[in-house]
Amino acid sequence: MLATRALSLVGKRAISTSICVRGGHGVAKVDDYALPAYFDRRENPLPDVQFVTELSAVQKSLKEKEKGSWATLSNEEKIALYRISFKQSFAEMNEGTKEWKSVIAGMFFFIGMTGLVVLWQRKFVYGPVPPTFESEWKEKEVQRMLDMRINPVEGFSAKWDYENKEWKK
Amino acid sequence: MSLAKPAMRGLLGKRLRFHLPIAFALPLVAAAAFKYGVTEPRKQAYANFYKQYDTTAEFNNIREAGVFESVRPTGK
């Protein structure tokens, strides 16, 4: 009794939004993202909802006509019905974008930046190379490899002319 | 506007009939190409090399160059 009198003070409108009087819990507000959504995906060909939610008068009459025989529908009407239910056709949703150009451009840019970093490193960070890279050392290395007959059949020493002591032509 | 109805069945079979023969033929071709382009010439090269190979003469040449550790070059 006391509760109903208190309710009449609160006003009729408040009752519809909160049913606090029963059980102490209210009804949760349903957010948009929690409802079934429409999305164009190749792997989900029939989404949960139609694309067009509020039909215009023309569309409503078209939907009524759809309830009858489909043979009476013209081609334009069929397309209009399709576009009510779906946003993009499979051909439209599958077509490629021009994103690959940005991707390639980004790749080149970062490879270039890395190249600059490597050059700077070579100049300012690394010390000198070992003595084994000098030409005199390399000459002695090659001579020793030829003396040892490294790969004499098809490889290194096969290209050396031992008679004339020069590389084969 | 009337488009033809697209193929609804037999898609995997069609793909296999196209791709399986290729899948078998290409590796066979690759293997044959490698065999007759690489391994046969290589075998011939080795056969020719050892046909005119004088082991003792080569040994003496390498010995004179001074790379052996078990024998020193003649002289000295």
Image (tube, helix red, strand yellow):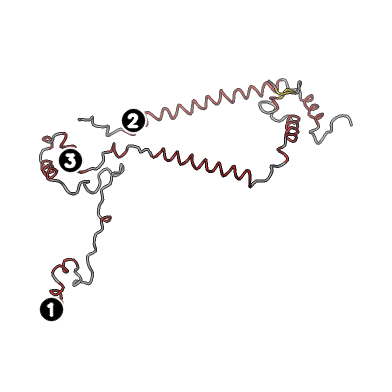
According to the picture, the residue beneath numbered tag 1 turns out to be: A1
Front-lying residue, B19 or A16:
A16
According to the picture, the residue beneath numbered tag 2 turns out to be: B14
Which quadrant, please, contains the C terminus of chain B?
Answer: top right
According to the picture, the residue beneath numbered tag 3 turns out to be: A81
Earlier residue among tags 1 and 3: 1
Check contact, mark 1 vs mark 2: CB within 8 A. no
Question: Which residue, as the protein is rendered here, is positioned at the far bottom?
Answer: A2
The chain holding disc 1 is: A
Q: Residue A132 vs residue A39: left or right?
A: right
Tell me the amino acid under the disc marked 1: Met
The chain holding disc 2 is: B
Q: Residue at x 18, y 72 (%)?
A: A21
Q: Residue at x 20, y 46 (%)?
A: A52
Q: Residue A13 vs residue A47: left or right?
A: left
SS assignment at label 1: loop
Residue A32 in the image: state x and y as whole percent: 25, 55
Front-lying residue, A152 or A55:
A55
Q: Quadrant of residue A22?
A: bottom left
Q: Residue B44 vs residue A102: left or right?
A: right
Front-lying residue, A7 or A147:
A7
Residue A54 in the image: state x and y as whole percent: 17, 49
Tell me the amino acid under the disc marked 2: Lys
Residue B48 in the image: state x and y as whole percent: 67, 20
Q: Residue at x 73, y 40 (%)?
A: A131
Residue B60 in the image: state x and y as whole percent: 81, 27
Tell me the amino acid under the disc marked 3: Leu
SS assignment at label 3: helix
